[in-house]
Every structure is written in structure tokens, then in C-alpha cells.
Amino acid sequence: MPGNGLVPSAESRVILEIRGLMVRYLPSRQKPVQPLKGVNLRVHPGEVLGIMGESGSGKSTLAASLLRLLPAHAEYSAGSVEFEAQDVLRMRESELRRIRGAKISMIPQDPATSLNPVLTIGTQISEVLRAHLPVKKGQRSAQVLELLKEVGFDDPERIASAYPHELSGGQRQRVVIAQAIACNPALLIADEPTSKLDSQLQTEMLTVLMSVVRRHGTALVLIAHDPGILIGVADRIAVMYAGSIVEEGTAQEIMQNPLHPYTQALVTLLKSEHRAGKTDKFPVIAGDAPDLTKAGPGCRFEPRCPGRMSVCSAQDPTESNITHSHRVSCFKHAN
Ligand SMILES: Nc1ncnc2c1ncn2[C@@H]1O[C@H](COP(=O)(O)OP(=O)(O)O)[C@@H](O)[C@H]1O
Ligand code: SF4
Ligand SMILES: [Mg+2]
């Protein structure tokens, strides 16, 4: 099935460890929302970790919180995000700046518009190198050309001297990947990097992204609007529902042996839509979307769950380990 067989063992090293992460948004004129309700997740060096979950489940909030990029009205209410044994949530701004873009890099949701329209491509990539690496200007120019070659440009000199508007959408995407890997980060976070592209460009961008991370041994957290994308490329998949990771496992465990009722519904729909050739949308699960303004205990999937029990609305389910790589949060599998 997926990836390159990078399945972590129980003793595998961890580069990012998220423990009990809770986040609330406190908008001035609306009720507080709790988009993250105790997220636990690990990322291992060089792996591709896919995150899937319906719209509003907290994926972008999670991605942004890993680099403390949430807006001012967000509150990190509990938990930690440890990168290389340091808690990102408690780091000084100056330390954080050293990590952002250098050790952890982010590919934005709309990469094409993230480029500065008044600077050449070469200047923009060079700027990333200048900010983080002690290399001289001449060396930087050579590195820029190397990076452009690496993301598939045969004519890097022309691309380096071009402005963003002179490039096609697909070319701009590749430039954004070059920028993101410029400092050879240990971890790349891509939040729905292909959602604004047509299907041919999606495949092209994903191919470039995968080849770059595999070559560099970069860990990739890939959030996809279309979970079908993850099935082909992710080593592991974390399933997110209403602010929690409800199941996590190798891509094979999730696709062949889903245990959480939400994952089961999702996988069943995914397989049938895949068979019908519809792979570009997130499957719609029956029932109402969860209310994230509701605080208090209980499984947030309970109103939609065909197998709910009385305990499910009274307590939060705890995590159960099924194998060393497969875990699920559901009372049906409590051990
Ligand atoms: N800046 C914000 N202010 C207030 N609420 C927000 C903000 N961003 C997201 N939300 C809310 O937080 C929840 C999770 O959103 P998000 O993290 O964007 O989910 P996803 O990326 O899975 O679609 C949603 O209910 C959304 O409306
Ligand atoms: S904890 Fe209960 S409500 Fe939640 S998914 Fe499991 S069985 Fe369903
Ligand atoms: Mg999102």
C-alpha cells in the first residue's frame, strides 16, 4: 500500500510530541469554541503522517498551533508541543523564530498567493536562506538554483529572475516547496496544500512534494482535504474528529482494520467513492456536525454514533493501544 515502509517501531525516535493539547478560541462577540480537546500525537523522523477529518474538526488549528501561529484570540489552555525536547508553547519568541522556516517549515493552504508579488523568485528563496543559514551571497545564489532544480525546473536561472505573476500556478507551487525545504527542515507541515488546484496540478504538486521529503528524509505532516490522497502516500494516518485524534495507525491499519465508529464510516464511504471514481471530496457522514462550543465531558461523536452507550456522554473515552502503532479512543475498545 502506501509510502516507503517507514513504519515506526515502539522504540522509534520522536521529533515532535503533542501531549494533551487543548485550544480555545475566545472571539469577542461569540461563544468560546474549543477546537482542540486534548490532542495527543507523535511524529517520527522522515515519516509521512496524514491527518484526515471533516471540515471544522480542528486540523488547521492543530497545524498552526505547532508553530504557535494561532490568532491573538486563541488560548492554549493545556498541553504541550515538544520539538527536539523543547516545548514550543513555552519558548521565547526569539527561539521560536529560529525554528520557524528553518527546522519546522509550513506550506500554506494557498501556496500560490503566499509569494510576494514585487520580489523575484530568487530573492524570495534567498531571503529564507539568509534569515537562517550562515552562507555568503554567492553561495546563496547557487543554492537557490539547486533548490529550483530539485523541484523540477530545467531552467532555474530563468525562474530565479522571474516574478510570481510570470509563472503558472503549478510553477508557483513548486517554488513554494523549494522555499519550504530551503533550510532542510526536520519537519514540514502542509495544510491542504493541493485544495486550490485542479486534479492534474494536485498530482504534480504531490509528486514533487513526496520526492523532496523522501530524498531529504524530512518528516511531513500532511493535512489533505481529500483523504484519498493520503491513502497512496502516508505511512501513518491520524483521524481527527471534533478536536481529538480518535484513531491513529499505519495507513494499512486504518484502511484495513478501522476501529472507531467514525473511522469505520469514513473508510466505508471512502472505499465506495473510490470504486465509483469520486476521490476528490471528503465523504459526508450522516448526522449533525458537532457543536464545538459545548464544553464538558463525553465523546463528541456520541450524537452520530450508531453504537453509543450511556457512558459515552458522561465521560471522555481514553486511548487504548491495539498494537504498538494502532490506537483508538472509544469505550468499545477500552482495555
Ligand atoms: N480564527 C478563528 N476564530 C474563531 N473560531 C475559529 C477560528 N478558526 C477556526 N475556528 C473554528 O474552530 C473550529 C476548527 O476549525 P479549523 O481548525 O479551521 O478546522 P479544519 O481545518 O479541520 O476545517 C471550527 O469550528 C472553526 O469555525
Ligand atoms: S465512545 Fe461511545 S459514542 Fe464515542 S465512538 Fe465510541 S461507542 Fe461511539
Ligand atoms: Mg483547515
Image: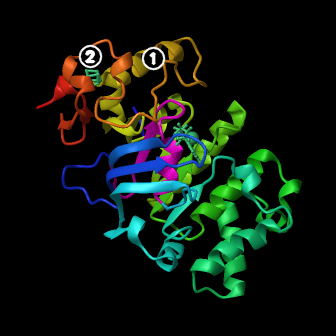
Residue type at mark 1: give it: Lys
Side (left or right) of 248 relative to 56: left
Quarter of the render that holds ligand 1: top right
Q: Looking at the picture, does residue 319 appear above or below residue 286?
A: below
Residue type at mark 2: give it: Arg
Q: Which mark is residue 233?
A: none
Q: Which residue does the numbered mark 1 point to in the structure image?
A: 271
Residue 124 in view of the camera: yes
Quarter assignment of residue 133? bottom right
Q: Position of residue 66 (x, y in %)?
A: 46, 57
Q: Position of residue 194 (x, y in %)?
A: 64, 40
Q: Nearer the viewer, mark 1 or mark 2?
A: 2
Label 2 packing within 10 angstroms: few (<14), some (14-19), many (20+): some
Side (left or right) of 71 relative to 236: right
Q: Nearer the viewer, residue 143 or 281?
A: 281
Q: Which residue does the numbered mark 2 point to in the structure image?
A: 308
Q: CA distance from mark 1 to mark 2?
A: 24 Å
Q: What kind of element bears circle 1?
A: helix
Stretch in magenta: 41-66
Q: Position of residue 259 (x, y in %)?
A: 27, 24
Instruction: Tell me what residue is drawn at x 78 percent, y 46 percent.
Output: 169
Q: Nearer the viewer, residue 99 or 313?
A: 313
Q: Looking at the picture, does residue 1 appear above or below residue 150?
A: above
Instruction: Tell me what residue is drawn at x 48 percent, y 12 percent.
Output: 272
Q: Earlier in the sequence, mark 1 or mark 2?
A: 1
Instruction: Tell me what residue is drawn at x 36 percent, y 24 percent.
Output: 301
Look at the numbered discs 1 and 2 and tell me whether their residues touch, using CB distance below 8 Å: no
Q: Per the image, is 47 magenta? A: yes
